[in-house]
Image (cartoon, rainbow, N blue to C red):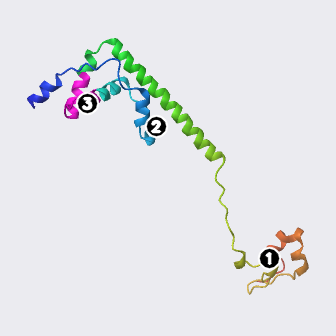
Amino acid sequence: MNNNLILESSYIIQLPFPPEITAKDFINRRNPDRFSAKGPNAFFIFRKEIVSYLKKNNLKFKMQEVSAIAGRSWKESPPHVKTTYKLIAEEVEILLNKVRNKLNYATERMNMFPIIQHQFVDLSSQTQFYEQNLYTPEFEYESINSESIIDENTVEENINPPRTGYNI
């Protein structure tokens, strides 16, 4: 095991109080695809603050070392510091719920009022119902009066005429 890792992981960082990070910072930096995911807990917010502190002071550590430092620092933090980070975590969750509700409302509205897509039918390729061929080689239909085909009341009946009196 690397001796530097042991020494660096024994560091304890006391962050400035009150924390510089706010719940809105987490929401603003969050990828919109991750709004449905649970918000960070108090320790993750604390760890994020340690990473920011290390970057500001140009201190470079491996993430494994940062995690060890964050864990030790969290353990040694006074209760009022932990409580503050817990409040920030709760506020992040409240803001995430508000964002989720807005997204759900927008989705529901889109489902209630879908965009109507018009389907255009090419009428030039369709033959009119009274021009149908009423005689096919397989079937012989009863004679149908062509005037009754045009009658609006019997359109459905005459599009598919009954097959009575045919020979097979």
Circle 3 or circle 1, nearest the eye: 3
Q: Which of marks 3 and 1 is nearer the N terminus?
A: 3
Label 2 vs label 1: CA separation?
A: 56 Å
Q: Which residue is drawn at 35% across and 12% down?
A: 80
Q: Which residue is drawn at 19% across and 34% down?
A: 62
The residue to which callout 1 is attached is 129
Q: Do the residues labelled 3 and 1 touch (CB within 8 Å)?
A: no
| Residue sitting at the far top | 79
Could you tell me which secondary element the residue under label 2 belongs to?
loop
| Position in image of residue 137 (x %, y %) | 74, 87
Q: Which dot marks residue 56?
A: 3
Q: Which dot marks residue 13?
A: none
Q: Which dot marks residue 35?
A: 2
Chief SS of the magenta region: helix
Q: Do the residues labelled 3 and 2 touch (CB within 8 Å)?
A: no
Region rendered in magenta: 50-71
| Position in image of residue 126 (x %, y %) | 72, 77
Quadrant of the drawing holding the C terminus: bottom right
Please indicate whether residue 68 sits to the left or right of residue 151 in the image. left
Could you tell me which secondary element the residue under label 3 belongs to?
helix
Other residues around mark 2 within 10 Å, as few (<14) / some (14–19) / many (≥20): some
Label 3 vs label 2: CA separation?
A: 28 Å
